[in-house]
Every structure is written in C-alpha cells, then in structure tokens.
Image (cartoon, rainbow, N blue to C red):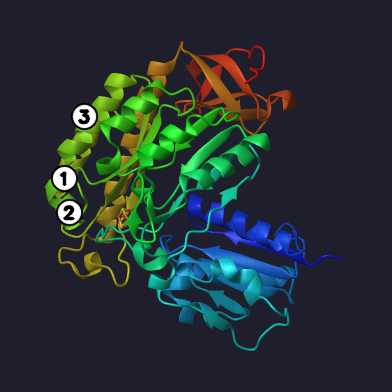
Amino acid sequence: MNKKVAFYTLGCKLNYSETSGISRMFNNAGYDTVDFTDTPDVYVINTCSVTENADKKCKRVVKEALKISPNAYVTIVGCYAQLKPKEISEIPGVDMVLGAAEKFQIIDHITDLTKKPKAVVFNQPVSEANTFVPTFSIGDRTRTFLKVQDGCDYSCTFCTIPLARGSSRSDTIENVLKQATEVAASGVKEIVLTGVNLGDFGIRNGEREDRFFDLVKALDEVEGIDRIRISSIEPNLLSDDIIAFVAQSKRFVPHFHIPLQSGNNKILGLMRRRYRRELYADRVATIKRLMPDCCIGVDVIVGFPGETREDFIDTYNFLNDLDISYLHVFTYSERENTPAAEMSGAVPGSTRAERSKMLHILSEKKRRAFYETQIGNHAEVLFETDIKEGYMHGFTRNYVKVKTKYDPVLVREIKHVTLTAIAADGDVEITEAEEVLVH
Ligand code: SF4
C-alpha cells in the first residue's frame, strides 16, 4: 500500500499553488495525497509569515495533526520556516524544517519516516533561493492558481516577503504557455496568474529577459482557457499598455487588484512604495475610461507608524472619491527585521482597530455601489462547487459574486445570465441561466 501524505496551507494563493506542486512531487514519488484527517504517514505544513501569530497557528496545526496520526512525520515549509527555523524546530512533534531554497527538494530530504527526538533543519540563507520552481493548484478544478513569478526586489519597509522568499525570478514564457495548455486540457476554465510581485515578471538569473506585458500577450493566444485573471499587480507596473490590452482581450477579464497601501503621500514615502497617490488615481481613471464595468480591488494598510488622524482621513477620502469596487484592509503589525518596526510614531492598537473598521464599512459601501451599477447587465458566470443553504455561487468575469438555487448541472460551467437584484446577504441574484456556453 502506498504511503499517505496530507497538507495544510496557511497564507496566500502562492502558498496554495506551491502546496499543490509539492503534493504532485509526492504523488510522483509513490505517495497518495489524502485529507488531513485521514491518518497520513506524512504531514506537510506550508506556513506564512504575514499571518498574525504565525507561530501559534503552526503549533496548533502540528498538535491537531499528531492527535489524528500520532506517528506521522511532520515537515514544516514556507515563509515562516525560512524566517524562524529555530523556533519552529522547537515545536514538539516537528521532525523537519525546510527553508525557501530546500522546500522543493522535500522528496530528497524525506529519507526515513521515523519520528525524530529533535527536528532536522535545512535552511540556507534566502539568497540561495534563486531558482524558479513552477507550480499550479487545481483545487476544486473551477480555477487554477498558476505561479509564474516568485520573490521580490522591492524593499517596502513593512514587508518580510523578500526575506522569506528571496529575489525576483520568473518562469519562462514558453513554460508558462505549456502549463497553461496543460491546465486548459484538464478542463479548468479560469487561470489566476500568481506571483509575489507579478508585474515584475521576466527576470531570470538576475537578468531581465522579458516583461509581464509580453507574457500577457502570449497567454492571450492559448486556446481552451476561458478566463485569465491577474491576481494582484503593483500600480507602478500596471502600464497603460497592459490596461489597453486587457480592455480588448477575450480571455483576460476586466478585474484588477492593485495594492495601494496608503492614500497619503507621506505614508507612501515612509513605506518606500514606488509611486505617489496621483499615479494610482491615474491608473484607476485609465481603467475605468477603457473598461467602465471593470472591477478594481485595493489593498490598504491602516495604522502604519507615523499615520496621524489627518493622514488616515486623507487615505479615507482618497479611497472614498476613487472609482473602485472593494478593499482588502490590513491592520499594520510590527514584523521583526523590518525598517518599519523601528520607526517612531507607533499607532495604538485600539486606533488601528478603529481605522480598520472604518475602511471595512467603506469597502462594503463601495462593493454595493459597484454591484448596483451592474444590475440589469447580461453577464457570463462561472459557477463554483460550493453549496450553502441550498444555494450555489459563481463569479462574473468582472468579479461580481452571484447566487442561485443549487443545481449540480451548473457546477464548474459558464452560463449566460442577467443580474437582477442585490440579495439581503449582499450577493447578486440572477435570472434563470440559459444554455451552457461551449468554448
Ligand atoms: S512589493 Fe513590497 S509589499 Fe509586495 S512583496 Fe515586494 S516588498 Fe513586499
């Protein structure tokens, strides 16, 4: 009987994509991937450094794992494993810790599965994490997160990601196209392009060989993929060329997620972001001019050191005036070994929480206003696999979340619908779907 491996992933889409890649490595080595509760022989826990209380979460998952399968071999990988190998190796029950340069050699490192009295640690400096390992997640097969870029050469003062993942590096366009074709052949209808600093795509072995725009143009030619979504792109890298191309593309959907972080230029400077708010407003205006129905999501951090009440109000008003569709709000928290953690002007926790709440309310207002502009529109919806209280969900190309009575025939299908009203829970109701579109 094959050995069994189970996974637990904390953090971002990139981690999910990489867990899927590692899972396939285990499958090629003769393991079966099973559920977390299915008494596996090996657990792999993929950690995150951005998650609040990453250490506590990691401890809790290890404890839970060993309750289910007390003799399982426990391996910890991911950003937190790179940043804090010693702390992680001291968690009771952990057998192996692999850093950023070692995580994709996991099969070579797992030689015998007997539990160790003390965890073994393989953790080279992050500068050694300089090869690109492509991965993609299939998940429930509605969409796949295709990793095309890793690492980051920027130095935003609040961020530990460059320390955990190393410098910017990318897949080749040729290989991305090969993977996209494979994904298309598996029946997945939507690809989400994923990376740490996706817009910086094109660096290999420290040299710039091509650009993200070249990848976008090449991917647009791949037959069999209905939708391609750009996960998140820095505003300074989202050029007018890319916006104009997406506006006329059949495959790239009208949805951008663009980190802003602050709407106040003083704070943007302290964060060492590479743009001022005027550039951001300009990008939003260009998108909306070319794609009036485009959905625009915004990342924003509240409570950064030195953010006064006036600075926050400046951010609030900037966002309020901007034609955007929703916010992802992050409450600033100090990270070891980052310049921001040493800055003066720390904002009290209660003020950070208050500001976060205000932006969450603003986000809901923005989402509703965006949805209202969509009512009456015809749209294509890709239905998900979920079922909640007799309803299923799906997303339009421009990321409007719709709901309808559960119908198994609709699962993972793209249908033409009309958006009729906003339901009490905030999702959008639709009229009965018509025929399945064949692409
Ligand atoms: S762009 Fe800034 S926030 Fe994003 S990963 Fe790079 S350093 Fe971190």
Q: In this view, does 363 lie above or below 305?
A: above
Q: Where is residue 302 in the image (x, y as percent from the top left)?
A: 27, 51
> In the image, what residue type sits under mark 1?
Asn
**Which residue lies under the disc numbered 2?**
307
* Residue at the image point whose x is 63% and y is 29% from the top: 392
Q: Is residue 292 above or below residue 151?
A: above
Residue nearest the viewer, comparing 234 with 424: 234
Residue nearest the viewer, comparing 308 with 270: 270
Q: In this view, does 140 lie to the left or right of 286?
A: right
> In the image, what residue type sits under mark 2?
Glu
Label 3, ligand 1: CB separation under 8 Å: no
Q: What element carries label 1?
A: loop
Using the numbered discs, state the Cα–Cα distance from disc 1 to disc 3 in whole angstroms.
14 Å
Using the numbered discs, state the Cα–Cα distance from disc 1 to disc 2 in whole angstroms.
9 Å
Decide which of tag 2 and tag 3 comes sooner along the chain.
2
Decide which of tag 1 and tag 2 comes sooner along the chain.
1
**Classed neighbour count for the residue bearing mark 2: other residues with Cα under 10 Å, few (<14), some (14–19), many (≥20):** many
Q: Where is residue 153 in the image (x, y as percent from the top left)?
A: 30, 59
Disc 1 + disc 2, Cβ < 8 Å: yes
| Residue 321 numbered tag | 3
Decide which of tag 1 and tag 3 comes sooner along the chain.
1
| Residue 264 numbered tag | 1
